[in-house]
Image (tube, rainbow, N blue to C red):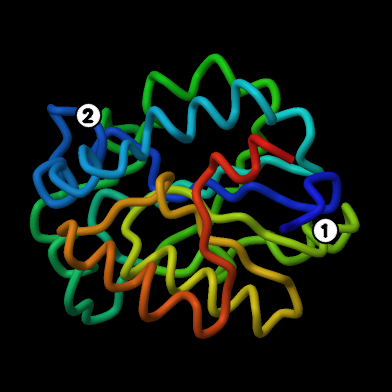
Amino acid sequence: MPDLAKSALILIGFQNDYFSPKGILHTVVEESSRVTGVVNNTLNLLDKRANDFGLVVNTPIHFTEDYSELNNPIGILKVIADVGAFKVGSFGAQVIEELKPYLNVIQEVPGKRGLNAFTHTNLYQLLCDNGITDIVLAGTVTSICIDSTGRSGVEAGFNVTVLSDCTSSRTPFEQDFYCNEVFPLYATVCSSQILLRQ
């Protein structure tokens, strides 16, 4: 298990468009989020261990009004542009209300415009500057942003842990498949309860 003092808890996708009932993409992750308890489990981890992590980082995704930063998007990024999600300044792009009590310990890393929290951000430099050796991933969508960030983290030299009960995907099946079959190929998978017992 990671040494929390040398670990960064990286929060991905904790925004209204995914987690608010009014969010444009709420139905995409609603069932999996309910099954894993992603929001409540992440809040519980923050409540009990936020100050023990070397860093707690939030990496929200934001787009301009016309999505000009996306060049011929396909898949989920095309869906985001088509439905108008995560526009800067919109309700959907804002951090979820439940995270606001922890903003004093959460450092926001801006610049995420796609699947990977390392791309177009200063996340790598921030982790290095703070002596971080391990990254712990929480958020959504498991099969996309969590996986992309986790793989890049490994390639950048970090040890990666994915929290199975602090992440969610498009379906419970997809969540279980990634946690059981994909993530163990390059990362440690565990529940937040393991970190709470450290």
Residue for point 48% across, 58% down:
112
Q: Which residue type does callout 1 highlight?
A: Ile
Say if 71 sits above or below 138 in the image.
below
For residue 44, the mark is: none
Q: Which residue type does callout 2 highlight?
A: Ser
Quadrant for residue 104, please give it.
top right
Considering depth in this image, is 21 or 125 the residue closer to the camera? 21
Q: Is residue 157 left or right of residue 48?
A: right
Residue for point 54% across, 71% down:
150
Q: Which residue is mark 1?
A: 132
Q: Is residue 22 left or right of residue 38?
A: left
Task: Answer few, some or many: residues within 10 Å of disc 2's Cα (few below 14, many 20 plus, some between 14 and 19).
Answer: some
Task: Answer few, some or many: residues within 10 Å of disc 1's Cα (few below 14, many 20 plus, some between 14 and 19).
Answer: many
Q: Is residue 27 left or right of residue 112?
A: left
Image spot of residue 167 (x, y percent)? 38, 50
Residue for point 28% across, 65% down:
176
Considering depth in this image, is 105 or 46 the residue closer to the camera? 46
Residue for point 74% across, 40% down:
198
Mark 2, secondary structure of its residue: loop
Say if 131 sits above or below 139 in the image.
below
For residue 20, the mark is: 2
Quadrant where the N terminus sits is bottom right
Considering depth in this image, is 160 or 19 the residue closer to the camera? 160
Say if 51 sits above or below 93 in the image.
above
Q: Is residue 58 left or right of residue 197?
A: left
Counting labels gives 2
Considering depth in this image, is 16 or 5 the residue closer to the camera? 5
